[in-house]
Image (spheres, grey):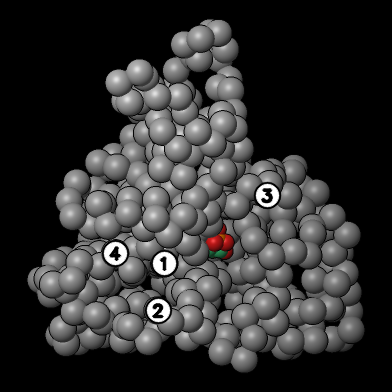
Amino acid sequence: MHPETLAVHAGQKSDPMTGAIAAPIYLSTTYERSVDGSFPSGFEYSRDDNPNRRNLEVCLAALEGGAEAITFASGMAAITAVIESLPDDLPRRLVLPDDIYFGVRSLLNETDIGKRFDWDVVDMTNLTAVREACSKPTGLVWIETPSNPLVKIVDIAAIVQVAQEAGAISAVDNTWATPLLQRPFEFGADLIVHSLTKYIGGHSDVMIGAVVSRASGPQNLALRAIQKHKGAIPSPLDCWLALRGIQSLAPRMQAHCHNAMEVARYLSGHAAVSAIHYPGLPAHPGFAVASKQMKSFGGMLSFEVVGGRNEAMAVAGALQLITRATSLGGTHTLIEHRASVEGPDTKAPESLLRMSVGLENVLDLIADLGQALGQIDQHAR
Ligand SMILES: Cc1ncc(COP(=O)(O)O)c(C=O)c1O
């Protein structure tokens, strides 16, 4: 079945007890044993497994075309689990993209995980640099494309091949693309990670993450053990909300992509904008690779305002419809000054604003950007 159909049907049969089309939310933490001590429903205790979680995991595995999905309390809990579950026979060294989501850098710099692993950071748009980094013993190669916040595009097939030659596991953070736009397993990746908090939840009202694996194997068992025993699980309501979000993912992604493309075209011609980062524009350095590996170019973009930090902050401050807030993938268009959010270690230029283009009418978004940028333009003259 096509992804659009799987999004509505996988893991989403009518409730066997009542025929309800929308699944009940199973809040029970515990399940009844039979006289012989067995669990006839297959459920025992909610940290181990829960019907809403299982439905979501079935759907995610089907959507990505993987063997198994394992959900966690947030995208960061999923990322942590991937690093911690790295098989013992692999080197404790990670190769990471320079534009990786800054939360991963904080995880390594500020928690004990950073003491247990070494890592190198490379520009993954430069294949020679990736090969060089992988010439040292490497356990995990991390791919994030499109990247956060510079919207860089990485050639998944090429990087996965380098990782395979190095004997390393490859993991792709597919949060910004979603399974509807990009299918990393088709390029040979071993693991896919999602912050389901973003497009998959889709309404800025649930925090949840997942790891999907291409094949069954020892790392899946290790991931399950982390989920079960370390206990960073999503609640039944979180799982229910994420699965409800998936049902409308396909048309939402179409609308996000359409709106982002229109906004990018508008910004690329504006005198107060010095750079625009959107892979759907032919001038973007990743356009050819994005056209090859993505079905459409996504709903995220960033742009740089002529001037610097003050001008970027002034544009964000002058917006009346577009909301100043972090995160992405919801119905509302959000904008933020990434350098302020990420702090002193940021790689984001001070003049950069990141936008998650939402589902409003794009003409209203363009009008709002126009009036805000117009104010800067006037000051500059
Ligand atoms: C690409 C990417 N990966 C992972 C995360 C972390 O997800 P969460 O906030 O659900 O922990 C984020 C959050 O913004 C993200 O943008």
Q: Nearer the viewer, residue 94 or 280?
A: 94
Question: Of marks 1 and 3, which one's residue comes earlier in the chain?
Answer: 1
> Judging from the image, what secondary structure is the residue with disc 4 in?
loop
Give amino acid for label 4.
Ser
Instruction: Identify the residue under disc 4.
Output: 85
Q: CA distance from mark 1 to mark 3?
A: 22 Å
Residue shown at the point (46%, 45%) measured from the top left:
47
Residue shown at the point (33%, 35%) measured from the top left:
62
Check contact, mark 2 vs mark 1: CB within 8 A: yes
Q: Quadrant of residue 190?
A: bottom left
**Mark closer to the observer (1, 3):** 1
Instruction: Identify the residue under disc 1.
Output: 80
Q: Crowdedness of circle 4 by 10 Å Cα count: few (<14), some, many (20+)? A: some
Q: Pick out the residue farthest to the bottom.
A: 344
Q: CA distance from mark 3 to mark 2?
A: 29 Å
Q: Is residue 356 above or below residue 122?
A: above
> Judging from the image, what secondary structure is the residue with disc 3 in?
loop
Instruction: Identify the residue under disc 2.
Output: 113
Name the spot of residue 260 as percent of width and height, x first: 61, 53
Question: Mark 1: is the Cβ under 8 angstroms from ligand 1?
Answer: no
Q: Quadrant of residue 79?
A: bottom left
Q: Crowdedness of circle 1 by 10 Å Cα count: few (<14), some, many (20+)? A: some
Q: Crowdedness of circle 3 by 10 Å Cα count: few (<14), some, many (20+)? A: some
Name the spot of residue 187 as percent of width and height, x first: 23, 54
Q: CA distance from mark 4 to mark 2?
A: 12 Å
